[in-house]
């Protein structure tokens, strides 16, 4: 098995109101040093549809647009061993969880967590939630944006992901 893979720092402004959590960056993302870098991943096209910044804009612009919208992006895992990019290939014994108590302490307005797929939700509920000392969070699993998750069309995924924009827009107006 390969060496330990290390994830990225979060994309997050201090006023983040919603957190999108993946499991661990793909090989394409790790190579590019950017979240959701695989060309067939639907994440950035979905964010473009929700927030207006083109999916092909420079990465720094896309990240800044999410911060401005109150959206944070991170992964549940800080590090792991995995061959390839599939979540099913993650070695469970190698999983290192990100420091969520510190993250939520630094982002006190954050109350909505959206999981980009099942693995992120499963690991978060099993290893993170109990460490958050009763913090009240709205947890929502969304369809994975991964090209490996081809069971839904882009349009179907967009319909599900619209709840992210509605939460950040409502929160921004309060």
Image (cartoon, rainbow, N blue to C red):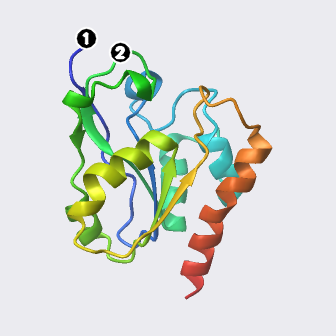
Query: What is the crowding at mark 2: few (fewer than 14 residues within 10 Å), some, or many (at least 20)?
Result: some
Label 1 element class: loop
**How far across and how far down the image is residue 124, in percent?**
35, 51
Q: Mark 2 highlights which residue?
A: 83
**How far across and how far down the image is residue 93, in percent?**
20, 29
Q: Is mark 1 in CB contact (under 8 Å) with mark 2?
A: yes
Identity of the residue drawn at 25% across and 69% down: 106
**How far across and how far down the image is residue 159, in percent?**
75, 54
Q: Mark 1 highlights which residue?
A: 1
Q: Is residue 171 above or below residue 18?
A: below
Q: Place residue 137 in its image quadrant.
A: bottom left
Q: Is residue 28 visible?
A: yes
Identity of the residue drawn at 24% across and 62% down: 130
Q: Place residue 152 in its image quadrant.
A: top right
| Distance CA(mark 1)–CA(mark 2) | 6 Å
Identity of the residue drawn at 72% across and 50% down: 158
């Amino acid at each position: 098995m390969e060496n330990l893979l290390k994830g990225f720092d979060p994309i997050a402004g201090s006023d983040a109101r919603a957190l999108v959590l993946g499991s661990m960056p793909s090989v394409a993302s790790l190579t590019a040093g950017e979240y959701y870098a695989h060309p067939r991943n639907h994440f950035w096209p979905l964010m473009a549809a929700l927030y207006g910044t083109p999916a092909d804009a420079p990465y720094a612009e896309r990240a800044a647009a999410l911060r401005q919208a109150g959206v944070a992006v991170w992964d549940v895992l800080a590090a792991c061993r995995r061959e390839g990019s599939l979540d099913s290939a993650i070695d469970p014994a190698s999983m290192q969880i990100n420091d969520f108590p510190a993250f939520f302490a630094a982002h006190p307005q954050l109350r909505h967590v959206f999981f980009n797929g099942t693995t992120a939700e499963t690991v978060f509920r099993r290893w993170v939630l109990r460490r958050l000392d009763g913090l009240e969070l709205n947890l929502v699993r969304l369809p994975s944006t991964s090209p490996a998750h081809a069971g839904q069309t882009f349009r179907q995924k967009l319909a599900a992901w619209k709840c992210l924009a509605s939460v950040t827009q409502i929160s921004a107006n309060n």
